[in-house]
Amino acid sequence: MTGVVTGVVTDVNDVVTDVLADVASWRAVATATEPADRAAAEAGVRLAYRRAGLAEPERIVWAGSPLEAVRLLRAADGDAPTAPGARGRGVRDEVRSAPWAAERTWLHERLGARGWGERWGTTGARLWDTTQALASRIRTGVVEELADGGPQEAEVRLLLLDAVLGQHDAAWLCAFDPEEGTPLDGLADVARAAGWWWPYERVAVVCERPVELHRDEAGRLDRGDGPALAYPDGFALHAWRGMPVPAEFVATLDTLTPDRIRDEENAELRRVMLEHYGYDRYLRESGAEPVHRDETGVLWRIPLPDDEDVAMVEVVNSTPEPDGTSRTYWLRVPPSTRTAKQGVAWTFGLAADAYEPLRQT
């Protein structure tokens, strides 16, 4: 009996280990920045067409980024292989949507609603935020670059809807776990080897992967000294802790001063400046005055034009460091905070009158 139980436990552990390995493998696909394996990607494209019952594309055209791909697809020159008359109709529904839906239906019927939910929760759901955030930001960047608010915006958005997301389809592919010889194996091969791609009747346009990807601990695009996402053709996106920022703005972050921060009219960009500069440094160098102090710490307030105040509580760790010094911490608290104790209590989810620590650490 013990042997049977041990065997069951071992089997369960093996399954968990395999799932975690699959998630890690597809996460690596989603965030890959190596040059595309063009031979493998092209073979995957041709296989995906065959799996869909279509003739292989006559040509496969490479683009340095989704931006360049959309530019190629908008080409007015009728002789260009990617021009509307030359490429033929879009076949994304046959190549991606139909087999995708069939595989999901099959898994749902096989596992049941609960089983499918559990499978998704342990596989694709773990990658969803990453892949969708990247895809959404890339789409927005392409629209802003080519037709921000202009009459061509609808055309650009429609072309973006024709794309198969390649590496950024990793969440779904992780959940489906396509094996060789199954309807999604070609799509999986392209995802492992390249970026986005566009399937048309006679032509497929395939993109390189990014060459740079910088994210913070929460997985958001984040970089203070260059592009957070960049492609080999120069298409780049800049962001600070997930918030899109202009490229020229990033270049100024290392030369910030309190006056420059106060003079920034855009409230969102001003917050980025403060985060990069450091609230405690800003307080020290801007001549701020404390508004309240008590046994828990010191409350500081930073008035900002056309924005809510920034309130910070300065607290000192009561447990000394190994060298005998005491570390100072800065806690961001709601603008409505009126006392230091109220602010510290808020960080514990308590009201000020309920915050009575036996020992502060």
Image (cartoon, rainbow, N blue to C red):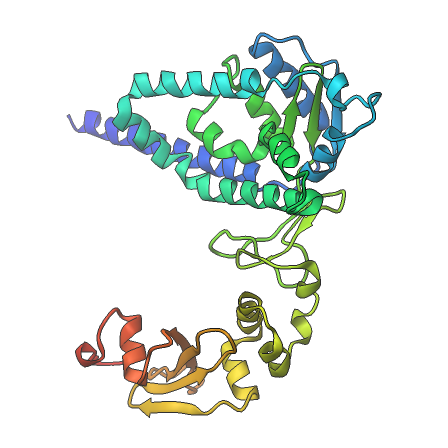
Rendered residue at 36%/82% (across/down): 317
Could you tell me how many numbered marks the image carries? 0
Residue 188 x/y as whole percent: 55, 24
Give coordinates of residue 137: x percent, y percent.
Answer: 57, 46
**Residue 179 in view of the camera:** no
Above or below: residue 293 compared with residue 14: below
**Residue at the location (69% across, 75% down)?**
255
Question: On the image, which quarter does residue 52 sit in?
Answer: top right
In the figure, 27 relative to 281: above or below?
above
Residue 74 drawn at (x, y percent): 74, 31
Give the residue at the far left of this rendering: 1
Q: Residue at x 54, y 82 (%)?
A: 281
- Does 255 sit left or right of 182 as displayed? right
Position of 239 compared to 297: left or right? Answer: right
Placement of 156 over or under 325, stated as above or below: above
- Residue at the image point whose x is 60% and y is 77% from the top: 261
Residue nearest the viewer, comparing 256 with 319: 256
Q: Quadrant of residue 249?
A: bottom right
Q: Residue furthest front?
A: 151
Q: Quadrant of the C terminus?
A: bottom left
Percent coordinates x, y for residue 53 in the rendering: 58, 7
241 up-or-down from 170: above or below: below
In the foreground, 99 or 14:
99
